[in-house]
């Protein structure tokens, strides 16, 4: 029984070694944009901790890997010592038996788990982080000792140099007046562009002008004139069942009474986790300007256009009519904001603190708070600010009065 117990222990620690080796490669290979998107939705504390301090989790995997090897080797040695009592003939084969452990360790503790975890990094990273976060507490003394030794070696032997990361440049541009504000914003957006995901800029369904596939060409043309867009998504039964889009150019020679079905073009589909550079490349490859965005369940959550992506870099594109004024200060600590105003712009101008969530515009935020499209006159309190809905239609919030009040709710 003692011998069996030793070999069970060896198998356990080889499996544990495989977990730590696989976790390390998963954490390194995982899509950080996907993790940020998961964090915005589910608020996992351990995911936030990993994004803030990935080195600690990597060190934890290396520490666990090393300790697993030590314990596996120790138990294997004890197993051989115990086996020699029952099988005296093995006493001359210690080296060969030790090589057997090395082979098992390399195959089952290194090659197989690393290959598996690397191919499924995005799926396995979250559960790995959950387990590693639980192991941080019992392994804390070893982590502290490892950090002390690392700092000592770095201070003694590392060459003095200045390392500037991309994140440092972005933060400098945001905080300092090194550039004019607009130019600095563009540079900052370009530097962070490859880490952005399409789900961060998707236009929600309630903000989109759409038309039913059963509509006529005349109705589609009127909708295009009314909206000012040259392309309009087409839905089948419900607005979250988008089947394509119609282009104004395709309808130029169409008969007014014709159904638009025959003019509907196929529309691209992207996951909300797709990196923006990949979306741009696909737009260029397919020569398209519009796509639907789906969540992890395949449900359509909105639309993204090439103009939306360009706006993320250089700001809103002005038309011949001039750029629409989306927010206007009407008196001290009082503003009239358009429902389409981006929340980060509202925060910059007014100083209001908006909780994180799956919304990006003022109208989307208020619709989230209400659980529906708010009605005119509805009031929402957010910290020291009051939001009053001034005008709406059946699809979206149009105008909002934003007012800063004191802690008693009075101006």
Image (cartoon, grey):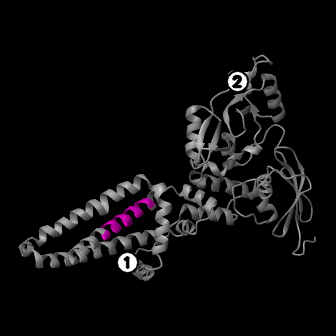
Residue drawn at x 63%, y 65% is 172
What is the CA distance from the residue labelled 1 to the residue labelled 2?
A: 71 Å
| Tag shown at residue 157 | 1
Quadrant in the picture for the C terminus:
bottom right
| Tag shown at residue 180 | none
- Mark earlier in primary sequence (1, 2): 1
Q: Position of residue 325 (x, y in %)?
A: 85, 49
Is 23 displayed left or right of 280 in the figure?
A: left
Q: Main secondary structure of the magenta part?
A: helix
The part of the chain drawn in magenta is: 12-26
Vertical side of 263 occupied by 280: above or below: below
Residue drawn at x 78%, y 27% is 220
Quadrant in the picture for the N terminus:
bottom left
Mark 1 element type: helix
Q: Position of residue 143 (x, y in %)?
A: 43, 78
| Tag shown at residue 261 | 2
Q: Position of residue 317 (x, y in %)?
A: 74, 43
Q: In the rendered structure, does residue 357 fall within the stretch colored magenta?
A: no
- Mark 1 vs mark 2: in front: 2
Residue drawn at x 55%, y 40% is 281
Is 323 or 202 nearer to us in this picture? 202
């Amino acid at each position: 029984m003692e011998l069996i117990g030793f070999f069970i222990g060896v198998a356990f620690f080889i499996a544990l070694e495989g977990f730590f080796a696989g976790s390390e490669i998963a954490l390194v290979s995982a899509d950080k944009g996907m993790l940020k998107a998961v964090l915005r939705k589910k608020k996992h504390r351990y995911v936030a901790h990993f994004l803030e301090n990935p080195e600690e989790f990597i060190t934890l995997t290396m520490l666990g890997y090393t300790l697993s090897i030590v314990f596996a080797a120790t138990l294997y040695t004890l197993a051989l010592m115990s086996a020699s009592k029952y099988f005296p003939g093995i006493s001359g084969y210690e080296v060969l038996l030790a090589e057997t452990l090395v082979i098992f360790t390399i195959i089952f503790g290194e090659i197989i788990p690393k290959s598996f975890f690397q191919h499924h990094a995005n799926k396995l990273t979250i559960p790995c982080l959950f387990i590693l976060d639980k192991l941080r507490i019992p392994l804390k003394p070893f982590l502290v000792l490892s950090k002390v030794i690392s700092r000592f070696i770095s201070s003694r032997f590392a060459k003095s140099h200045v390392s500037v990361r991309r994140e440092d440049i972005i933060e400098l541009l945001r905080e300092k007046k090194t550039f004019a504000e607009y130019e600095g914003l563009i540079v900052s957006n370009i530097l962070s562009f490859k880490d952005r995901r399409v789900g961060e800029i998707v236009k929600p369904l309630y903000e989109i002008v759409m038309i039913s596939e059963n509509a006529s060409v005349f109705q589609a043309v009127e909708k295009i004139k009314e909206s000012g867009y040259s392309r309009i998504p087409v839905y089948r039964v419900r607005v979250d069942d988008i089947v394509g889009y119609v282009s104004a150019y395709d309808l130029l020679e169409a008969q007014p009474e014709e159904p638009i079905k025959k003019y509907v073009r196929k529309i691209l589909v992207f996951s909300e986790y797709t990196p923006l550079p990949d979306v741009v490349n696909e737009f260029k490859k397919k020569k398209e300007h519009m796509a639907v965005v789906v969540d992890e369940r395949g449900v359509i959550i909105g639309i993204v256009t090439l103009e939306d992506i360009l706006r993320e870099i250089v700001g809103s594109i002005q038309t011949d009519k001039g750029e629409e004024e989306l927010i206007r200060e009407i008196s001290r600590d009082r503003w009239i904001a358009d429902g389409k105003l981006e929340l980060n712009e509202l925060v910059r101008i007014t100083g209001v603190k908006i909780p994180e969530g799956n919304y990006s515009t003022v109208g989307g935020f208020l619709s989230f708070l209400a659980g529906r499209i708010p009605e005119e006159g509805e009031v929402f309190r957010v910290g020291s600010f009051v939001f009053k809905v001034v005008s709406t239609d059946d699809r979206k919030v149009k105008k909002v009065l934003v007012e800063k009040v004191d802690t008693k709710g009075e101006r």
